[in-house]
Amino acid sequence: MASSKVSLLNSERRKRVFLGALPPDFLRITTTPKQQQEAADQQAAWALHHQLVGTSLVQNTVGRLNITVAQAKLVKNYGMTRMDPYVRLRVGHCVYETQTDPKGGKTPHWNKVVQCPLPQGVNSIYVEIYDECSFMMDELIAWAHIPIGKNVLNGETTEDWYPLNGKQGEGREGMINLVLSYTNGGRAVNQCVPLMMIPSTAQNMFGMPQYSQVPVYTQLPPQSIVNAQHFVQIEEMFPNIDKEVVKSVYEANRGNKDATINSLLQMSDA
């Protein structure tokens, strides 16, 4: 009697099973015409925003700021494995990122040159160091607010270590090594394309402003400005300065040998 009931139940279950070819939209998320229109409207809004921001950026530019993000020395490695740090810079309303240093841990190196237009009234840059994560949001490790010195705006190239804030406290998370130089006047051509970000009122757990990423622009092809012979000569003149720093200053001066030598002399005398 019990076996007949089980057979009957199995028979009823089989009737409920879908047999035959699966429909084309099986397990696919379908969008309604309203959702498609909203997506199109959002793309149009982004395009308009990009156009307005780009126009405003060109009109308000007073010069070009060259930032070489050389390296950092952090006091702690957060996590079970060595961190994969990268740097995010904010200059005005433009945000730039370096490449990630895989397993860079507490001593990451980037040697990334960022050439960005400096808007009128902007006299400082914001630096954030993140640990790139695979299965969760990237973790903010350290940050700093760095004023752009008058000596930089007067044409001097500076190389310095700046203290970082973080979980360990203000100025106690380590230091970051930057080379700064500035070219005055003209419409600065942005050789390093920014990630445009829109500020919001939200803040993360460290009290730093949050930004919503806006996908913009295509990376411009890199331009080779290094004259090998000049570069070797400059290196021989400054054997006590790290080669990467020499290269960064040379690129920041757009391959101008005399300007590079003057900048390095200023750095040596500092």
Image (cartoon, grey):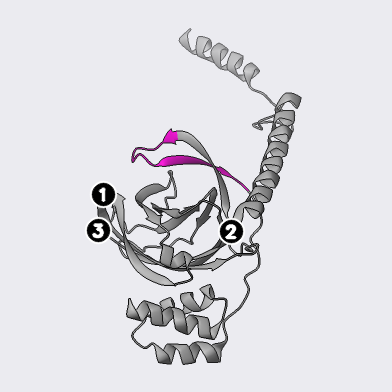
Viewer-proximal residue among 215 and 11: 215
Q: Amino acid at mark 3?
A: Val
On screen, residue 187 above or below 235: above
Q: Nearer the viewer, mark 2 or mark 1?
A: 2
Labels 2 and 1 touching (C-beta < 8 A): no
The residue at the point 44 percent across, 66 percent down is 152
Helix, strand or loop at disc 3? Answer: loop
Residue lying furthest top = 1
Q: Nearer the viewer, mark 2 or mark 3?
A: 2
Q: Nearer the viewer, mark 1 or mark 3?
A: 1
The residue at the point 33 percent across, 76 percent down is 270
Which residues are drawn in magenta? 202-215
Residue 211 picture location, percent across and down = 49, 41
Residue underneath mark 1: 170
How far apart are the two marked residues, 1 and 3, measured between alpha carbons?
13 Å
Q: Residues within 10 Å of mark 2 (few under 14, many from 20)?
A: many
Q: Which mark is residue 62?
A: 2
